[in-house]
Image (spheres, helix red, strand yellow):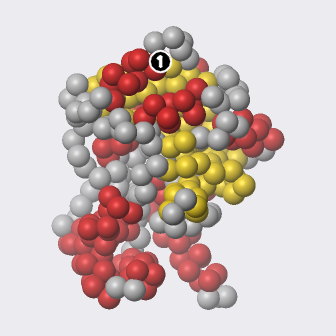
Amino acid sequence: MKLVVVVPVYNEAKFLRECLESFASQSYKNITWIIVNDASTDESPEIIQNFIQDKSEFLFVNLTHKSEHKPGAKVVRTFYKGLNSVNYKDFDVIAKLDADIILPPDYYETMITELENNPKIGMVGGLVYVEKNGIWNHETIASKNHIRGAVKTYRKECFEDIGGLRETLGWDNLDVLLSRMKGWDVKVVKNVWVKLLKPTAHVYNDTKALKLGKYFYNIGLDPALSFISCAKAAWNDRSVSNFFISYQSYISMVINKEERKITPDEISFIRKYRWKEVLNKFGI
């Protein structure tokens, strides 16, 4: 299977060469790598160019105007700048990978094997681990049943079925929900993990609750589902104020009738699916 991996980069000079080396060391060789520099202001472009100069499997897309900083939309927009630099229909598998990830050598060999062994799998990925005090542990910002946006791998047919990635906060959950809507299986390979060199939490701590409400709106939740989801997140954070911040953020989006990047049919499926999950947890 032919695989194309798109890697958006913005100011990743500190770790970039180490990450690129892990990409180039993959045991699976039928890969085209597209490294997209999103107008970095550090040495990232030079590091990329120096690294790939003798590696024909690596392509470099250099954006001179930074993408508009809009949560969720920015990284998807940069991803498409890379994907659209080739004809993605020439590939069987499409992957999005963050630039601060260290891959184990057999990462993509494992992902391709999963897709080859089960034609029902539309999306696959490993787990994301972070280091603390010299020990690597699963980053608990997401459950072990969710494929993080940093390590998404899609069968091309699934990618097309869901209409690609949506330029919105919550895109990396929408793709999972829409894959299931279209009848695809989504698999997390839990015995395979990658190293994330910049823990996610430190970027979003200050605005986490605010963005959470927007995220619940963007993925189509109704007010009751959003209330439950905000309450659960606040309980996990041990923060009553986070509940009010996130739910108020959601209600504000409802009042303003903010645009969603999903259709009415998709919203209907997502609400039914999420309600089924909630009721199942209560044994109903």
Label 1: few (<14), some or many (≥20) within 10 Å? some
* Residue denoted by label 1: 52
Residue 181 percent location from the top left of the image: 58, 56
Q: Quadrant of residue 207?
A: bottom left
Would you say 2 lies left or right of 143 here?
right
User: Is 50 above or below relative to 166?
Assistant: above
Task: State the residue at coordinates (50%, 50%).
Answer: 196
Residue 284 percent location from the top left of the image: 65, 88
Task: State the residue at coordinates (67%, 36%).
Answer: 105
Residue 91 percent location from the top left of the image: 60, 24
Q: Is residue 225 visible?
A: no
In front here: 105 or 256? Answer: 105
Task: State the residue at coordinates (39%, 18%).
Answer: 49
User: Is 2 above or below relative to 175?
Assistant: above
Image quarter (top left, top right, bottom left or bottom right) of the N terminus: top right
In front here: 118 or 66? Answer: 66
| Residue lying farthest to the front in this orientation | 134
Quick one: SS at disc 1? helix
Q: Amino acid at mark 1?
A: Ile
Give the mark count. Answer: 1
Task: State the residue at coordinates (35%, 61%).
Answer: 202
Q: Is residue 120 visible?
A: yes
Residue 277 percent location from the top left of the image: 59, 75
